[in-house]
Amino acid sequence: MPGCCPWNCFNICRRRNRSPGFGPQSPSDEEAAIELQTIPPPPPPLGNDASTEDGNIDLNVYQYGQRQMWGELRQRWIDDPNEPNCTVQPPDFEYRSLAHTKRRSERWIVKFDRWIPRPPALSADLENCGLPVGSEDYHEAKLTKQSSRPSPRRGTTGINIHHIAAARGVIILRNVDRYDGPWWSQVALAQYDVHFGRNDLRHIYLENVINVDTRDFIQTLWAETQPANSPRFQLNPEAGNQVSWEFDTPGYKAILGTELGKGVAAIVVSAFNRGSRRIARVVVWRATIMQIRFDIEPRGH
């Protein structure tokens, strides 16, 4: 069963600082499922074997089509500081400012801000990866705000939601729904920065994944690792065992090109100097529903 890299352990240590003005938890605020926004596509990769003479992209050269194309581009953004046309924007705000901006229309409501134990669905894997296991080691916050303009994808306004947990070495995306404003990758990194150092970040989890684009594609990808006519992911007992896709493989690139994978890549591009780290592998398994872990390592490790 794929595990975490052996050097990836930490002493449990963090500053348990609570931001002022954060409200209490409401029982109705317990939302664990992820529904992620569509991230607008960047310029297509040019100058490689996928480019035709007229500049169009031949998707037939990719085993997994457009997803693999977008994921390959993100792999290059992470790996090569000289790769052009990177569209990722690191957070240009402090986490605390989201709830304390002077303009009320831009102010986020903090539903809860608290220290919790590790999420139950990920409990065993977090421990296996040498991540914190204490009863108050994970900083969890949920922020909401009414959108100020319609979502280009939905054509309507709605409530933005960012529900993220973090501990030393790990970011866990629990629930996201975006109409406008900052991307979840920006909020997650800003939240992580409040309490922990970026150099310690080694794992990013997507908990209880129901995002259709990501879930359905990975279920299809996972089925390729199983014998013919096996039960599908949600019904197959084998889905409880972890399956991994390693760096630079077609499946790995295609996962980075899904809606959720693009956001994870954006965190890595933003958190580190480009070319200094890479996502070494993607690990998928079922604990009630789909769980995903992205392992971050220094290049050359």
Image (spheres, helix red, strand yellow):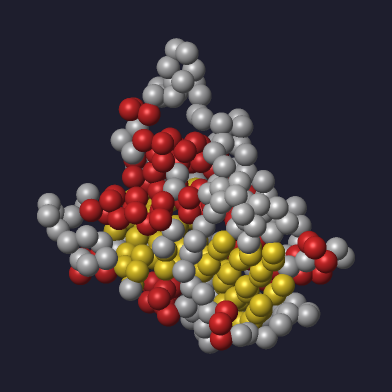
Q: Residue at image x 65%, y 57%?
A: 157
In the picture provided, is 99 more to the left or to the right than 278?
right
Q: Residue at image x 56%, y 36%?
A: 42
In the image shown, does 297 or 184 lie closer to the viewer? 184
Task: Using the rendered image of the protein, determine whether residue 65 is visible from the camera's viewpoint.
Answer: yes
Task: Using the rendered image of the protein, determine whether residue 136 is visible from the camera's viewpoint.
Answer: no
x%, y% of residue 213? Answer: 41, 51
In the image shown, does 153 or 288 lie closer to the viewer? 153
Which residue extends farthest front?
A: 156
Which residue extends farthest top?
A: 53
Give the vertical position of 216 relative to 43 (above or below).
below
Classify the position of the N terminus by image quarter.
Answer: bottom left
x%, y% of residue 258? Answer: 44, 48
Give the vertical position of 82 relative to 200 (above or below).
above
Give the vertical position of 15 relative to 99 (above or below).
below
Q: Residue at image x 48%, y 73%?
A: 32
Q: Residue at image x 27%, y 69%?
A: 240
x%, y% of residue 54? Answer: 47, 13
